[in-house]
Amino acid sequence: MQNGISGTVIVSFIVSKEGVICNPKIERSLGIELDNETLRIISLMPNWIPGKKDGQPVNVSFMLPVKFTIQ
């Protein structure tokens, strides 16, 4: 907010068979501060429901946009 930066950071990660978020990686950056905040938020998220293939849980690659706005 101090620097007046707003926009969307794109982060990719793997949702494991157990629903745990693994290997978060910034795909589109808005600067180191917002990238670090995005990774912090991703690390705090609860487990997800894993993807399934043929009724069995599988690892799934996911991309998530995180939008930062100034109010």
Image: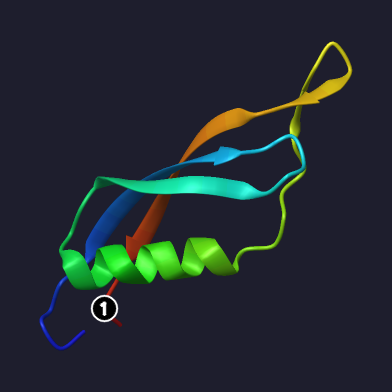
Q: Which residue is mark 1?
A: 70
- In the rendered view of the protein, which quadrant contains the N terminus? bottom left
Q: Quadrant of residue 53?
A: top right
Crowdedness near tag 1: few (<14), some (14–19) or many (≥20) residues, C-alpha within 10 Å = few
User: Looking at the image, is 56 positioned above or below residue 9?
Assistant: above
Number of callouts in the render?
1
Instruction: Residue lying at the far left in this picture: please name it.
Output: 3
User: Looking at the image, is 28 positioned above or below residue 69?
Assistant: above
Secondary structure found at label 1: loop
Instruction: Name the residue nearer the viewer: 15 or 68.
Output: 15
**Left or right relative to 66: residue 33:** left
**Residue at image x 85%, y 21%?**
56
Q: Quadrant of residue 52?
A: top right
- In the rendered view of the protein, which quadrant contains the C terminus? bottom left
What percent of the width, then of the height, locates residue 31?
15, 64
**Residue at image x 10%, y 82%?**
3
Amino acid on which disc 1 is placed = Ile
**Residue at image x 72%, y 49%?**
48
**Residue at image x 61%, y 29%?**
60
Instruction: Residue lying at the far right in this picture: please name it.
Output: 55
What percent of the width, then of the height, locates residue 38?
38, 64
Instruction: Residue lying at the far bottom in this picture: please name it.
Output: 2
Q: What sort of colour scheme is used for the picture? A: rainbow
User: Looking at the image, is 51 positioned above or below residue 4?
Assistant: above
**Left or right relative to 44: residue 26:** left
User: Looking at the image, is 9 positioned above or below residue 36?
Assistant: above
